[in-house]
Amino acid sequence: MNNTESKKKVIVVGGGIAGLSAGIYALKAGFEAEIYEKNPVAGGECMGWNRQGYHIDNCIHWLTGTDSKTKLWEVWKTCGAIDENTEYANTSKFYSSRLGDKEVSLWNDLEKTQKELIEAAPEDEKEIRKFIQHVEYAKSCVIPSDKPMDMMGVKDYIEMGKDMADMPKVMKEYGKINCAQLTDRFQSPVMKKLMTDYLPADYTAYSLIVSYATMASGNGNIPLKGSLAMTLRIVKRFKEMGGVLHTNTPTKRVIIEGKKATGIELEDGTIVKADDVITAVDTRFLYGRLIDEKYMPKDLRKAYADSKAYPVTSGFQTAFAIDSDFSGEDTIFFECDPIKIGDRTFTRMSVKSYAYDKSFAPEGKTVLQANVVQTDADYLYWESLSKDEYKAKKDELSAEITKRIVKEFPELEGRITLLDCWTPLTYNRYCNAYHGSYMGFVTTVGNKQMRFKGVVKGVNNLFIAGQWVMSPGGLPIAVVSGKFAVQRILKRDRRSIEI
């Protein structure tokens, strides 16, 4: 690398996981790197906050890439998120579903799960055994983390095929049905609920199987101290490498002159020059706000125009202080009295206990969080409310959810206190998240999985990182997309992309 290359300046817009990853890999490649983040703290949706002496975790239900034998683990390690000494929560299951007097669970131990499910629903034994076998197959599923798929050669695809040798079996059996259709294969009512509780019914069935396999394989552990602590480790790594992080510094636009991005203009009017720009923001905010919407790829435009084919997921969430060491065994879904939000009515909800992380609450106490899944339509409802109506609805729903939790868990009567609540609008306000989504587009049956190159056609030095570049989004896509954005710069400059 010559001196000219070493002084090249890369600006990253957005300090979430994708932006921090892009900054770290830019520094690793020998560039100068500066990140501009609109919020007081970097991390985007990988965030947590404190209320009344308790810690509320917003993000990590499991972290894909905790198996040190995977290439994704190497990316997390490079970013400072985890390493060989990382301590993980001692959890034993993915989630549980209750219906009436029956409760079934997806344990990390597949044999235990199979035995329990067959005992609970002997009429579904054949389908249960098939399901568990394909979860075993799905343990081979990996997220490409070495380089973008469009940069892969024949050898790379052969190696990936070897690594994921059993995934074609999963796709053949479950690739053309969604979770709702998966329930048709089961007779037991509680088994039907188990198959649609964790992911929305229109998600592809294989998404559920791969998610469960990630947990069962040991590649989806939960780092202790939560999402914010992990974010802060990544920020520390970025700064130690010489990166500059600007917080409370929103970007107004990317400056494009001809076919080149010359830098960015901040909201206060300051112009910052750069050799290359990486945007790591929500793509709906990028196209139409930071740059002209004319640059939006056709497939992405179609996805935004058709929320039925490409829905997004959010939630109305509440966090509670529990005056006991209530474990609740992590995440439980259960029937509840109807809850009405806008035009939609919900009769199931979930609670998640954070008793597994003692740093979240004072000794002998626990944080419990509840979630009512929200969709595009729900976001539009929340958006239609006035400020006073919005607050009143939040207060009303929080009280109703508290009642339903106590009804399901009578032992919590008098021991549960609301800490905070938030809606899809919260994600939009804090992260510019499209319709409040905390993942990318849902992949639905019969529709092409969303994936596009992290480039802006017609601008040769503007690159895109973030969970929206590839479904289903989430933390693993975010962190590898930051690396991939830097590799695109290196390829354009005819340098080695090995970083």
Image (tube, rainbow, N blue to C red):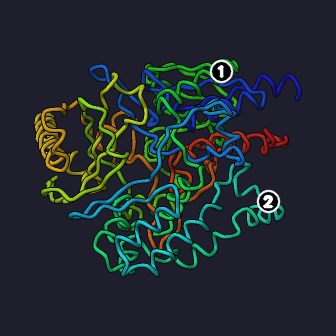
| Residue 74 higher or lower than 262, as above or below | below
The mark that comes first in sequence, 2 or 1, is 2
Corner quadrant of residue 297: bottom right
Image x and y of residue 160, in percent: 74, 61
Which residue is denoted by mark 2 in the rendering? Answer: 156
> Quick check: 357 left or right of 213?
left
Image x and y of residue 191, in percent: 34, 70
Q: Residue at x 41, y 63 (%)?
A: 310
The mark lying in front, picked from 2 and 1, is 2
> Quick check: 88 left or right of 142?
left
Does residue 298 appear in this view? no
Q: Dot 1, how many residues are within 10 Å of its Cα: few (below 14), some (14-19), or many (20+)?
A: many
Q: Residue at x 18, y 41 (%)?
A: 411
Pick the quarter of the image with the N terminus.
Answer: top right
How far separated are the C-alphas under marks 2 and 1?
32 Å
Q: Amino acid at mark 1?
A: Gly
Q: Dot 2, how many residues are within 10 Å of its Cα: few (below 14), some (14-19), or many (20+)?
A: some
Corner quadrant of residue 278: top right
Which residue is denoted by mark 1 in the rendering? Answer: 243
Corner quadrant of residue 462: top right
Pick the quarter of the image with the C terminus.
Answer: top right
Does residue 91 appear in this view? yes
